[in-house]
Amino acid sequence: MPILAGQIVTAGQLNRLRPTPYEITASGNLALTTTETDVPGASITLNTAAANAIYVATGTFGFDITSANTNYAEGILHVNGAQASGNARWSGEVNTDFGPAAQQWSGTLAAAGSHTLKLRSSMGSGGATSGIQILGAFTRLIVVVYEVP
């Protein structure tokens, strides 16, 4: 809803116009399997005051090979329990391979209230059942929420 010329603007409307940033670093490492799993500590719960707030999220995943393999790793965002469209993807091959993969997501938080955005990860099923981990110290989630008056 736009603010009209001559309209008296409330403090609540002004507060919702301000973008609100949130950020977190994962709290621990995660050995990946082919089963999608929560990244330890990489979850943000926030509250919106109005319906249809817009979020922009950036996830950076620190992937590390622990034993030589040709699988890939994926970084995933879940918003209120549903997977957001688009994944970060990374692959390495030898024990010394390490690197980040990042992805950006955006969407609408349809209802006012509490919302949870969290990073999850898994690896492909290319033969090896282990051998890639997420390094928590190099894995971050940053979310900016834009509310409308």
Image: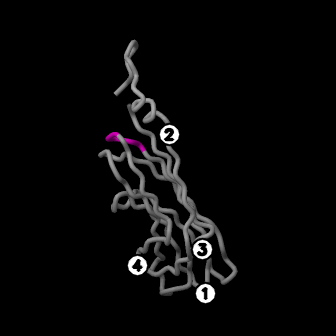
Under circle 2, the secondary element is loop
Pick out the residue farthest to the top: 6
Of the numbered discs 4 and 3, the one sitting upstream in the chain is 4
Foreground tag (3 vs 1): 3
Q: Is residue 104 depicted above or below 134 in this figure? A: above
Q: Nearer the viewer, residue 127 or 57?
A: 57
Amino acid type, mark 1: Ser
Q: Is residue 149 depicted above or below 53 in this figure? A: above
Residue span colored magenta = 50-54
Q: Which residue is drawn at 62% across and 76% down?
A: 64
Foreground tag (3 vs 2): 2
Q: In this view, does 114 lie to the left or right of 61?
A: left
Please state the horizontal and vertical placement of residue 143, each as a whole percent of the image: 50, 51
Q: Do the residues labelled 4 and 2 touch (CB within 8 Å)?
A: no
Amino acid type, mark 4: Thr
Of the numbered discs 4 and 1, the one sitting upstream in the chain is 4
Q: Is residue 51 magenta?
A: yes
Residue 19's mark?
2
Residue 67's mark?
1
**Which residue is the site of mark 4?**
35
Please state the horizontal and vertical placement of residue 107, each as a whole percent of the image: 40, 47
Residue 135's mark?
3
Amino acid type, mark 2: Pro
Under circle 4, the secondary element is loop
The quadrant of the picture occupied by the N terminus is top left
Foreground tag (4 vs 3): 3
In three-dimensional space, the C-alpha distance between marks 3 and 1, rounded to whole angstroms, equals 15 Å
In three-dimensional space, the C-alpha distance between marks 4 and 3, rounded to whole angstroms, equals 17 Å
